[in-house]
Image (cartoon, grey):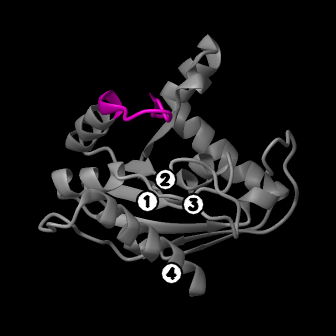
């Protein structure tokens, strides 16, 4: 209930705060689990991407955000779950697989953290492992403008345009590439969406 209330409120409020262009929604599966793989510009991304589709989406959030009991509870209502970014979090990977088996789509950020436009980033192998082990489609997403709408360190939203573009599904179920190579191929596809 709280998930969908938040979904409706954010979709409504967004109309007044910043213009959003969304492309490629036809690439989002209407049923079954899948993996969203997106670049990460702003804290706004895990909220903005789910309102672009009518599926209930789960996502990872850094474990420090769950230290506040009320905010941690609220994040869990939004289907978020914690991940330890400073180490290989096997527990988080197991939780991802559990949720995917329950047909709950997962939003992942291959870079692992926010990266400003133009900055160099390193992908994490985790999404490659998940893509192979689950055998599920990976939907690449390119997001831009959210770092200007809600800049790092800011507490206010600026009325500037943002964009979310969904790419065609990728499948790595039969791939024998190393997980890191797969993660890089996913991220390359995400970046290619910027050129469309």
Q: Which residues are magenta?
A: 79-92
Counting residues from the N terminus, which is met first, the one under dot 4 or under dot 3?
3
Instruction: Kindly state the secondary structure of the residue where label 4 is placed.
Output: helix
Is the residue under label 2 in contact with that under label 4 (CB below 8 Å)?
no
Task: Give the label, 4 or 3, closer to the camera.
Answer: 3
**In the image shown, does 161 or 154 lie closer to the viewer?**
154
- Residue 191 vertical position relative to residue 59 in the rendered view, above or below: below
Q: What residue is shown with label 3?
A: 121
Marking on residue 192: 4
- Residue 179 vertical position relative to residue 44 in the rendered view, above or below: below
What residue lies at 50% left-to-right and 81% top-to-bottom?
192
Counting residues from the N terminus, which is met first, the one under dot 1 or under dot 4?
1
Counting residues from the N terminus, which is met first, the one under dot 2 or under dot 3?
2
Task: Give the label, 1 or 3, closer to the camera.
Answer: 3
> Which x, y percent locates residue 138?
33, 63
Q: What residue is shown with label 1?
A: 37
Distance in Å between CA atoms under marks 1 and 2: 6 Å
| Magenta-colored stretch includes residue 94 | no
């Amino acid at each position: 209930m709280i998930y969908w209330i938040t979904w409706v409120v954010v979709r409504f409020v967004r109309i007044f705060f910043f213009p959003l262009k969304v492309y490629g929604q036809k690439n989002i599966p209407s049923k079954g689990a899948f993996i969203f793989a997106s670049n990460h510009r702003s804290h706004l991304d895990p909220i903005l991407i789910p309102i672009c589709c009518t599926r209930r989406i789960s996502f990872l959030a850094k474990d420090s955000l769950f230290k506040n009991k009320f905010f941690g509870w609220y994040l869990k209502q939004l289907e978020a779950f914690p991940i330890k970014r400073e180490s290989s979090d096997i527990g988080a990977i197991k939780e991802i697989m559990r949720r995917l088996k329950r047909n709950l789509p997962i939003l992942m950020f291959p870079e692992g953290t926010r990266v400003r436009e133009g900055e160099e980033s390193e992908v994490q192998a985790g999404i490659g492992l998940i893509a192979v082990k689950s055998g599920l489609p990976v939907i690449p997403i390119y997001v831009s403008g959210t770092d200007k709408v809600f800049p790092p360190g800011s507490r206010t939203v600026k009325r500037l345009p943002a964009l979310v573009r969904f790419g065609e599904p990728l499948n790595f179920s039969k791939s024998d590439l190393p997980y890191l190579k797969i993660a890089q191929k996913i991220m390359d596809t995400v970046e290619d969406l910027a050129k469309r």
